[in-house]
Amino acid sequence: MGEGPAAGPHDAGSVPVLRARGLVREFRGFRAVDGVDLDVAEGSVHALVGPNGAGKTTLFNLLTGFLRPTAGSVVIDGHKELVGRTPEAISRLGLARSFQITSLFAELTPHQHLELALAGPTGLGWRFWRSDRALARFTAPAAELLARVGLAGHGDVPAGSLSYGRKRALELALALALDPKVLLLDEPTAGMGAEDVDRTIELVQEIRAGRTVVMVEHNMNVVASLADRVTVLQHGKVLVEGPYAEIRHDPRVITAYLGDSDVAR
Ligand SMILES: Nc1ncnc2c1ncn2[C@@H]1O[C@H](COP(=O)(O)OP(=O)(O)OP(=O)(O)O)[C@@H](O)[C@H]1O
């Protein structure tokens, strides 16, 4: 777990589970991510925050292989380079992101989604997706995952009919089906009401056990509740990095956020 001081990314001798060096991503000459170094300690919850347009989503996409960096490296487990690999290959190396609701199939039930996600890495894949017998061995693990994210009573309805909060819970379950060592969450509480936010915080507390979580999150209460360390981005660069209790009082962070709300958009 991330509480131990030995897990701190700056401790001499500790190798971060995820390390980015000199990450750059240009869009037609504009540097959305501009030389980012990132160390994520094993077992920690690490939040990426920053004002609008700071480069959080772009960085997230670089880490997960959805975008290719213009320059730089991303290494998992101290030696496996992720740059140049597909998102699928990266997820096989232990780094997976939560799916987006837009990738859910409205007609399939949460249970079916999970059976397919669990079948994917086994090589059964989608070819056998109609075969109930082939998928039967995933029935119990799928039910377990549904229970874990609070969807036990909602496994057999079309996913399209789920509430927003439950769809987001299903996304999380789908990412957990891959049992990633490092789980990346893209704004896990975006668009949620207070009740769903609280449930999601509890859920992330629960699923962080035995893994590392990196999340982009706008809601500072969520960051305060969950994150061991926070990287604040601004204009594509790391502005400040540290525990939430430290960065929240940092004048540079306060100015960056105030500056953001002052900008006419
Ligand atoms: N595909 C793209 N083409 C051109 N510019 C892009 C592209 N993607 C992102 N950008 C620009 O890069 C900058 C960083 O965007 P990014 O979405 O990574 O920021 P963000 O911190 O996630 O912002 P937000 O909090 O608003 O989601 C922005 O100025 C954005 O307009």
Image (cartoon, rainbow, N blue to C red):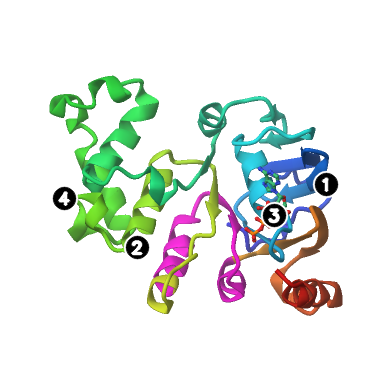
* Residues tagged 1 and 2 counted as in contact (Cβ below 8 A): no
Query: At which x and y percent is residue 144?
Result: 27, 49
Amino acid found under the numbered disc labelled 4: Asp
Residue ID at (42%, 38%): 178
Q: Quadrant of residue 6?
A: bottom right
Q: CA distance from mark 4 to mark 2?
A: 17 Å
Give whichever of discs 3 and 4 has the lower sequence position: 3
Which residue is nearer to you in this view: 127 or 82? 127
Q: CA distance from mark 1 to mark 3?
A: 27 Å
Residue ID at (16%, 50%): 156
Side of 122 relative to 60 (left or right): left
Q: Nearer the viewer, mark 3 or mark 4?
A: 4
Tell me if mark 3 has few (under 14), some (14-19) or many (20+) residues whose alpha carbon lies within 10 angstroms of its own.
some
Numbered disc 3: secondary structure: helix
Residue 164: mark in rendering: 2
Residue to which mark 4 is pinned: 156
Query: At which x and y percent is residue 209?
Result: 49, 55
Q: Which residues are magenta?
A: 198-226
Query: At which x and y percent is residue 120?
Result: 36, 28
Residue 34: mark in rendering: 1
Quarter that holds the C terminus: bottom right
Q: Quadrant of residue 258?
A: bottom right
Residue to which mark 3 is pinned: 7
Q: CA distance from mark 3 to mark 4?
A: 41 Å
Give whichever of discs 2 and 3 has the lower sequence position: 3
Quarter that holds the N terminus: bottom right
